[in-house]
Amino acid sequence: MSEITLVEAVTQALAFELQADPRMVVFGQDVGANGGVFRATEGLQQRFGRERVLDTPLAENTIAGIAVGMAVQGLHPVGEFQFMGFIYPALDQILSHATRMRNRTRGRLSCPLVYRAPYGGGIHAPEHHSESTEALFAHIPGLRVVVPSSPARAYGLLLAAIRDPDPVIFLEPKRIYRTIKQQVADSGTALPLDHCFVLREGRDVTLIAWGAMLQETLSAAEQLAQEGIEAEVIDPATLKPLDIHSIIDSLEKTGRCVVIHEAARFAGMGAEIAAQIGEFAFDLLKAPVWRVTGYDTVMPYYQLEDFYLPSVTRIVAGVKEALDWDHPRSRG
Amino acid sequence: MSEITLVEAVTQALAFELQADPRMVVFGQDVGANGGVFRATEGLQQRFGRERVLDTPLAENTIAGIAVGMAVQGLHPVGEFQFMGFIYPALDQILSHATRMRNRTRGRLSCPLVYRAPYGGGIHAPEHHSESTEALFAHIPGLRVVVPSSPARAYGLLLAAIRDPDPVIFLEPKRIYRTIKQQVADSGTALPLDHCFVLREGRDVTLIAWGAMLQETLSAAEQLAQEGIEAEVIDPATLKPLDIHSIIDSLEKTGRCVVIHEAARFAGMGAEIAAQIGEFAFDLLKAPVWRVTGYDTVMPYYQLEDFYLPSVTRIVAGVKEALDWDHPRSRG
Amino acid sequence: MHKPRMQLLASFDIAYLQYLDERGSPTQVLPDFATADSLCRAYRQMLLARLVDGRAVKLQRTGRLGTYPSSLGQEAIGVGIGSAMQASDVYCPYYRETGALLERGVSIEEIFAIWGGDERGQNFQRAPHDLPICVPIASQILHAAGVAFALQYQNASQPLRVAVTCAGDGATSKGDFYEAINLAGVWKLPLVVIINNNQWAISVSRNAQTAALSLAQKAIAAGIPSLQVDGNDVIAVHWAVNNGIERARRGEGPSLIEAVSYRLSDHTTADDASRYCPQSEREAAEKLEPLGRLKQYLCSQGVWSSDHQIALEEELAQVLERALRHYNHAPKDAPNALFDHLYARLPEAFYDQYDNLLNCSESHS
Amino acid sequence: MHKPRMQLLASFDIAYLQYLDERGSPTQVLPDFATADSLCRAYRQMLLARLVDGRAVKLQRTGRLGTYPSSLGQEAIGVGIGSAMQASDVYCPYYRETGALLERGVSIEEIFAIWGGDERGQNFQRAPHDLPICVPIASQILHAAGVAFALQYQNASQPLRVAVTCAGDGATSKGDFYEAINLAGVWKLPLVVIINNNQWAISVSRNAQTAALSLAQKAIAAGIPSLQVDGNDVIAVHWAVNNGIERARRGEGPSLIEAVSYRLSDHTTADDASRYCPQSEREAAEKLEPLGRLKQYLCSQGVWSSDHQIALEEELAQVLERALRHYNHAPKDAPNALFDHLYARLPEAFYDQYDNLLNCSESHS
Ligand SMILES: Cc1ncc(C[n+]2csc(CCOP(=O)(O)OP(=O)(O)O)c2C)c(N)n1
Ligand SMILES: Cc1ncc(C[n+]2csc(CCOP(=O)(O)OP(=O)(O)O)c2C)c(N)n1
Ligand SMILES: [Mg+2]
Ligand SMILES: [Mg+2]
C-alpha cells in the first residue's frame, strides 16, 4: 500500500469500480487518451477500453444529459466536467432531469449517476478555472453534493457516490489534488455519505470547512492551539444532505462556530449551516455563527486571488471574533 | 389613473421606458404578436415595432447571451424567460458573462440589462412551470435579484431595474399577476432598489416574505392580530443586495423573525437572511430565526402543490414556534 | 470584380417523401407493410388519439384537467412512430405525443393523470423502459442519445435495440437538439430523431425559428442522414421511422426525420391561437389533415366503410369511457409522495421536513 | 426491397478556397487586395503574433505568466480576420487570438497582463468596443450575435458596422455555436463567424467532435452561407472574411467560415500534446504552416529578402522588448479592484466586505 495523492485516489476509485461493475462508464472532455486535464482518468481508457472510457464532444449540457439517458437504462455513468466554471450549461439537465427522474416516474426510473468536477481556486489558473459554486447545487432538491478533502476520503466517498442509487455531484478540490499524500488501501471500501468527519477535536470553537479550505482551517487551528485555543475541525464532506447532528454535537462542547468556504458568501453554504445551527442549537450558541468566506464578488484573475480566498489570518481573525463576542458587531 | 394588475404594471413600465429610452429593446419567446404567454408584453410590438419588440427562437441561452452583446454595445435589453423553470440553460451566460463584463474589463464595458421571468407555484400549471429558484441567482456575484409583490412595486421596481447600470434579474410572482389591483400612476417614477418595504407594522415578530408569499404572510399576520399578536411584515423586494439594516431595525422591536419562501429550504434565501440576522443582530434575538418554506423536494405536479407551498396555517404555526420558543426544538 | 475559383468540397441533398396525397391518392406504389390490416389499425390508433385529445380538452374546460397540449392534426406522426418501433426499443417523448404514447402502451388514464397534475401518470405500467414525457424543450433528445448509448453498450451485437425521440419545430432552435444529434453522429448511436414540424412554437412560426429551408437539413450539421416526410401521411412517417430504426439496428447510426404537419389546435388549452395565427392558414391546413386522407384511401380500397367507421367510433367511445371512469375514481396521491420518491431512501436530514409535511397534511385534510 | 421515390427538396454545396499552396505558389489569380504592401504587412503581423506567442510561452516557463494558449501555426487566421475588419467593426475574440488581437490594436502588454492574471489586460485601450477574450467555449458567439443586433439597431441604414467572432473546432460542438448562427440567420444579423479549425480541442481531435465532413457545412443548419478556406493561407482567410463582412455590411446577413489550420503547439502551456498527438501528424502539419509559404511567395515576387527579414526581426524584437518592459514595470492592481468594478456603484450591503478586504490586504502586504 503506497502513498497516493487525492487525484490518484480518484483514479483508483474509478478503476476499482470500473473493474467491479460492468455497468459503469466514464466520459467527459479529454478523459480518454489524455487521462483528463488533471490526469484523474489516467490510464483508464487503455485499461478498460474506448467503450467504457470516452471522450465527449465539447459540450457540458451533453455530458449531463446523456448521463441521464444512460442511467435510466441501467448504466452507472460517471461524467467529468473539466472545471466547475464550465458546468453551468449542464445545470438544466442536472436540476430538471437527473434529480427528478425518480420522483417524476414515481420510482419507475432512477439516475444512479455521478457528475465529477474539480473546483476551487489557488492554482493560478485562467479565468473561470477557479470557481466554487457548491451552493448552487446544494439548493437543488434530490442532489447529493459531496466534497472530499483527503486522498482517503476521495477514494471512499467517490466509491460511495458511484454506488449510490441517486445522483451525486462530486466536487474535487483541485488545489490539493497533489499536495497531500496518504496511504489508501485499494480495498473497494466506501465511506459513508451524509456524514461529517471530525478532523480535529477541540473544546473552544467549532470550525467547519470542506475541500481545500480545510488546509487553511487546520493551520488556523494549530496556530490557535499555540495561543491555547482548542478548535474542533469538522469536514461535512457531504454538504447536502447535511449531517447537522454531528455539528451540533460539537457545538454542545464549544458553543461557538465559524464556517469557512471559498465560495462567495451571499446565499452560500455557510448561510445554510448557520441557519440550521440557529434552528437546532440556538440555546447552545454563545456567539453568532461566523462566516469566513470568499467575498461577494467574482473570483478574480490570479494576481488577486490570494486576497479573495480565506487565509489562515482571516480564519484566525474570524475565530477570535467568535470567541471575543459579547456585544453586537457594528453594522457600519 | 385606473386600477391595474401586477402584470399590467409590468407592461406599463415596459411601455413607459420603451417610449422614453430608444436604447431599450424587449425580446423573448412569444413576446411579440402574442404579447407573452402571460400578456406582460401585450401590445408592445404593435406600438413600438418589430425592431424593438422581438420574438426569439426557442432558446433561453440565446436570450441571455444576446442580451450581453446588446448591452455592451449600449442598448438596454430586457429579455423575457417564459417561466423560471426554463431559465437554467441561460445560467451560464448570466453567471459567466452578464455579471462579469464590467469587472472583467475593469469598467470598459457594462451590462445594463434586465432578465424577466415569472416564477412560483399555485396556478395549477404543468411540470417545471412553478419554480422558485431565486437563491441560485442570489448566489451570483454582481447580480441584482428583484421581486415585486404588488402592482405599484412591479411598476416602480421594474423601471429601476431597467435604468440600473448593471444586470438585474426581475422575478415576477405569476400567482398574483391578476389577483391584486392597485392604482398606479404611469409617471415613470422608479422605486428604490436595494431597499426593504415594510408592509405592516408590528411589535411581536418580524415576518419576511416576498412575491406571492406575501399574500399568505399578510393573511397570517391578520390571523395573528386577532389573537393579539402584532406581526411586522417586511418585503425585501431586492433579495440581493439585501437591505439587512431595515430588517434589523424591525428586530430591535420584535426580537423574533420568521422568513417565509416558496423555494426549497436548503441553501435558500431564508438561510442567508437567518445567517445575516445572526451576524448583525445576535443580541437582539429572543428566538432562532424560523424558516417556513417549500420542502427540500421537487415542486410537485399540481395535485399536491398545496402541500408543498407554505400555507397560512404553516406560517402561523411557525410564528407561534418563534414566539413560544424557550428551549431547543427537538432534533428528532 | 475578382471572383475566386473554388473547389467543391461536399454536396448534400435533402429529399422529401410522400405516399398518400391530401385526397388519399397514392403518389407512388405503397410499401409492403401498408396492408389493409396495418392501415386500418393505424387509422384506429389515429382516431383514438384524436378522441383522447378532444376529450382531454373538454376535461380541461370543465376543470377536471390542467393545461393540455392537443396533438390535433399530428396524429400520423405519433402513430407512424409508434407503429414502427418494437416494444423493446425505448421511446423518449415530449409532451405533444398522444398518438405515440398510446402506441407505446401508455394508458389513457396515465395520460390524463399527467395533465391532471399527478406524477403517477408518468409511471407507465406498460412501457416500463420508456422515458416520461419531457416538458423542457429539446432536453429529451440528449436523454435519447444517452439511452441509445446504453442500448448499444448493453447489446454490442446487432440487431440493436434503438432509441427513438420526438421534438417540435421550435425544439430545433435549442442547443440541446444540435448537441444531441452531433453526439449521436460522432458516436454512431442507434437513435432516430423525429421532428414534429407543426409550424408553430406557441405563437412563433416555423419561419421565425430558423432561416433554414427545411428542418431536415439541420442533420447535415451533425453529419447524419435525414429526410423530410409528409407528416400527415402515416405511411410516409412509418416508412421513414422504420427505415431509420432499421439503419440504427444494423449499427449504421442515427438519422433525423422532419415530419411536416400542422397544429390544428391552440398550442395548449391555455393558449389562444387566434391572436397570432391567420384563420386562412389554419383552414388551408385542415384540408391536409391525416385521418381524412387515410380513410379515403381505405374506402377507395374497399376495406373501410361508414359501417366500419360507426363500429369503430362506438368501440373507441367505450374505451374512452372506461379510461375516464378509472381516471375519475383513482384515489388521490398521498402528500408523503412528495418525499417518497425523491431519493431511493430518504436521507435522515429530511426526516424533520417529512414529519412536518405529514403533520400539516393531516391538519389540511 | 421496396425503394420509395423521393422528391429533391434542397441541395447544398460547400466550397473550398485557397490562393497560395503550401509552397507559396498561387493556385489561381490573386485578388486585388493582395498587393506587395498589404502582404508584407500581413507577413509582419503574422511574425509579430508568432514572436509574442513564443515569448509568452517562455514567460510562462519562468513563472512570469500563467497558463498560455499559443496560436503557433494559426497566425494567418488572426491576421486574415483583423486585416479584413474596420476599426469601427466589433470583434468578439476567444482566447487563442494573438494575431487578431494585435490587429485590433490590443497591446502586447495587455495580452501578457490577461495571461499574467490581471483583468486590466482586458481593458483594451485601443479597441474600446471589442469584447474581452472569452474563455467559456462558444459563449462569445452569442455575444457577437447580440453585438450584431445592436450595430444593426443603432445604424439601420447600410453600410452597417459588423460583428466578427472566432471560435475553435471544438466550439462547434456546443449548443451556443449553433444557437448563435441560427439566430443570426433568422434575424439576418451583420455577423461573420470564423472557425479556427486547428484540428484539436485539447486532446480531442476534430473527427471526435463531429461526424460532419466539414465544419463549414454546419452553417446549412442555420440556413446561412459558408465556406471552407485554407486557414494557413492569409490571402484566402482575408478574402473570405472580407467577403463575409461585405455581405453583412450590405444587410445580407451572416455567414460562416471554416479556416482549416493546425495547432502546432501544446493546447496551452499546461498541456502535453505528445500524450495524444502523433508526432508524424504534427510534422506533416508543420510543412503547411502559414508564414513560410507567404514569405516564399513574397520572395518569388522580389518584394522580400533575407535583408528584409533581418530588419523586420530586429524591429519586432524591439517592439517585444518595449512591451515586456511595460509589462514588467506595471504597478500591481490593488486589492480593492476586487469590488471596484463589480457594480457601477458598490451597494451598501457590501461595504462591510469591502472594509474587511481592505483591512486584510493591509495586513497581507
Ligand atoms: C426550454 C423551454 N423553454 C420554454 C418552454 C415553454 N414552451 C412550452 S411549449 C413551447 C413551444 C414549443 O414549440 P415546438 O418545439 O414547436 O413544439 P410544439 O409545442 O409545437 O409541439 C414553449 C416555448 C419550454 N417548455 N421549455
Ligand atoms: C464551456 C467550456 N468547457 C470546457 C472548457 C475547457 N477548455 C478550454 S480550451 C478547450 C478546447 C477548445 O478547443 P477548440 O474549440 O477547438 O479551440 P482551440 O483551443 O483548439 O483553439 C477546452 C475543453 C472551456 N474553456 N469552456
Ligand atoms: Mg411546433
Ligand atoms: Mg481547436
Image: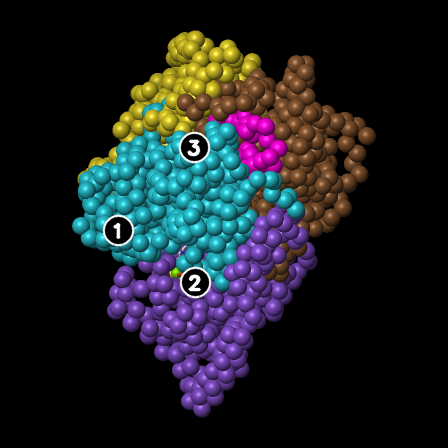
Chain colours: A cyan, B brown, C yellow, D purple
In the rendered structure, which amino acid carries the disc numbered 2?
Asn
Please indicate, yes or no, whether residue A37 appears anywhere in the rendered image.
yes
Q: Which residue is mark 2?
A: D196
For residue C134, above or below residue D357: above
Q: Secondary structure at mark 1?
A: strand
Q: Is residue C320 above or below residue B210?
A: above
Q: Write down the chain letter for disc 1.
A: A
For residue A252, the mark is 3
Give residue D74's position: percent from left, percent from top. Answer: 42, 69
Residue at the spot of label 1: A182
Q: Does any atom of ligand 2 lie closer than 8 Å to the CB of label 2?
A: yes
Q: Secondary structure at mark 2?
A: strand
- Discs 3 and 1 share one subunit: yes
Range drawn in magenta: B267-295
- Residue at mark 1 to residue at mark 2: CA–CA distance: 44 Å
Pinpoint residue B236: horizontal percent, then vertical percent. Answer: 65, 35
Q: Is residue C175 visible?
A: no
- Characterize the local packing of mark 3: few (<14), some (14-19) or many (20 or more) Cα atoms within 10 angstroms: some
